[in-house]
Image (cartoon, coloured by chain):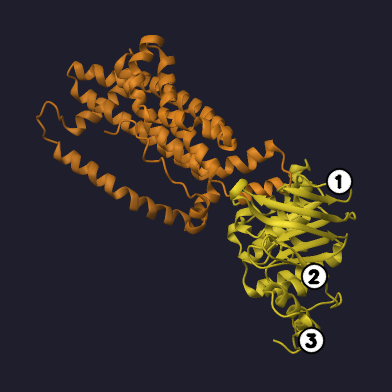
Chain colours: A orange, B yellow
Amino acid sequence: MFTGTLWKSLLKQLWLPVLVFAVLLVATAGSTSFYFPPLTRVLAALWTGLTGGGLVGDLLFSLRNIAFGLTLATVAGVGAGLVIGEVRLLRQATAPLLDFARATPTVAFVPVIILTLGIGSGPKVFLIFLGSVWPILLNTVSGVHGINPAVHETAHSYRIPWRLRLLKVVLPGALPQIFAGIRVALSVAVVLMVVSEIYGSPVGLGNFILQSGSSFKVADTWAGTILIGILGYALSVLLLAAEHLLLGWYHQRPTRARRALRPLRMRENRNEVLSP
Amino acid sequence: MKRGSSLIVEDVRKSFGEGPDEHRVIDGLSLRVDPGEFVCVVGPSGAGKTTLLRCLSGLTRPTSGTVRYGDSPVTKPVADIAVVFQDYRGSLMPWLKVWDNVAFPLEGMGVKRTVRKRRAEECLAAVGLSPAEVGDKHPWQLSGGMQQRVAIARGLAYEAPVLLMDEPFGSVDAQSRFDLEDLTLSLRRQLGITVIVVTHDIDEAVYLGDRVIVLGGRPATVIDNLTIDLGTGRDQIGTRADPRFAELRTRVLTQIRGEKAPEQVPKAVI
C-alpha cells in the first residue's frame, strides 16, 4: 500500500518534467543551429565529459567549495544567530549592521576577494560563506525572537539550565526558520560558486562553461550549464530530506497551529542576491 | 512528597512603566498560603491575577514588598514551586514527545533518561492518561483537555510541594473542565501538596478551594479572604447544588461586582 501511494505521488510530480524533456528532445532533434545543438548531442557531451573528460574533477571542486562554504555559513550563522536572538541588547545593536550586510550583494565582493586572496579554493569557499551566512543568520535571529514567550516562561519556571535550554528549547524552536534561511542560502551559494569560478579559476564548473563557451564548444557549454542546474537541484533535494528528518514535528502539525508558532515568514524572498 | 513551606506575600506592589506612564497593577497586597492548603485566587479580568501568580512563582519581581517561601525570599523560580500555565499550546513544546515534555524539568536536574522516562510514565498515569497510548505522541496530536493533563503531569514530575496554576482550565471544553477540576482535587488529596489556582471563574474557585481570596479594585488588592466550609469530599453535582455553595458564590460575586453586602442578598439566588 505504501509503495502504491509513493508511486502515485511520484507520478503526480514527474509527468511534467518528463513531458518537458520529451518536448525539448523532439524540438531540438533536427536542429542545425550552432548555438542550440540537439539535446542528444548535449547529453552525449555531458556523458563523455563525466566518464572520460575532466568534468568530474570540475564537479568535485565545485561541490567541495559549496559544501565547505555552506557548512561554515550554517555553523557560524546559527551560532551567532542564537546568541544575537537571545540577547536583546545585542539584537538591537547589530540590526542596522546586519541589514546593511544583507543588502550588499556579495558578488560585488568577488573582484576584491580574488585580488586579495588569490584564485585558489580558499577565496571561493570564503565567498560562498560570505554570501550565504546572512540569510541563515537573519533567519536564526528572527526564529529565536519568534519563539512563543510561553515556551521561555516554562523553561524559566522549571529552572532549565542554559545549555539544555539552548539545545532543546531555543534551537528546535527556531529550526523551521533556520531551514528557511538555509534554503535561501543554498541558492545564493550556487550563484556564488559559479561566479567565483568564472571570474578567476583554472578549475570548477564555472570555469568549464566559460572555457568551453569561449572556444565555441557549445554542446559542452550547455552540458556544463545543465550539470550546474542538476547540482543545485540535488542539493536542495538533500536539504529537503534533512528538513523532513529534523522537522517532522513541524510539518505534520495542522497548518493553523503551525502559523501560530511562526508568525514571521519574512526574508525568504528578500534575499535573492542577484535579483534585478 | 516532601512537605513544603508557607508562601507569604507582604505588602506587594507591582507597577509597569515609569513616571507618568506608570501603571500600577497591584497595590499593597498581602496573603499567606500554608502547606497543604488549596487556595483559589479569584478576581475580574485585569485585576492583576496573573501578575500576582508571576510574583508568587518568581517569574517577576514585585516593585516593592516581598514574596517569601518559608524563610527565603522568592526572587527567581524556586525548586519547590511548579507552575501550570493557562496556555498549554504554548507551554508544551511541540517538538518534544509527550513523555519528554513531562520529563523535561527532570532533565534540567540532570536525571538519567531511563529514570526520567519511568517517572514521566508514572505522572501521566497519575493524571489519567495512558503512557503507552500518549507517551510517544506529540502534544498537538492530543485534545486540549489531554494537553492540559500533560502540563499538569509535568508539574507533578517536578516533584514540588507547591503547585501554582494560572487559569488552568480556561481553554478547555466544559466537560473536560469538570474532569480536570476533580483530577486536581484528587491529586491534592493523594499527594498532600499545596495548590494555588488563579481563576476568573467564581464557581470554580468556590468548588475547588479550601479558601478563596478575592482580588478587586484598580490597582488590585485583597478584598476578601473566605474560608469555604464545604468539606473535603466534593462532587460536581452534589456540591454545586448545595445551598451553602450558592451562598458562598453569591458572596464572592457581589464583592467582585461591588454591589450590596452579602448579608442582604436573599439565600435562594440562582
For badge 2, the amino acid type reads: Gly
Chain of the residue under the numbered disc 3 shown in the image? B
Q: Secondary structure at mark 2?
A: loop
Q: Is residue B210 left or right of residue B169?
A: right
Q: Is residue A141 left or right of residue A25?
A: right
Quick one: B215 or B141, which is closer to the camera? Answer: B215
Quick one: A22 or B28, which is closer to the camera? Answer: B28
For badge 1, the amino acid type reads: Ser
Mark 3 vs 2, N-terminal side: 2
Give the label on residue B209, or none: 2
Q: Position of residue A7 (x, y in %)?
A: 39, 52
Q: Residue at x 43, y 24 (%)?
A: A130
Mark 1 vs 2, N-terminal side: 1
Q: Position of residue B186 (x, y in %)?
A: 81, 69
User: A238 above or below B106?
Assistant: above
Q: Which residue is mark 1?
A: B72
Q: Which residue is mark 3?
A: B243
For badge 3, the amino acid type reads: Pro
Q: Secondary structure at mark 3?
A: helix
Q: Is residue A267 left or right of residue A215?
A: right
Q: CA distance from mark 3 to mark 1?
A: 42 Å
Q: CA distance from mark 1 to mark 2?
A: 26 Å
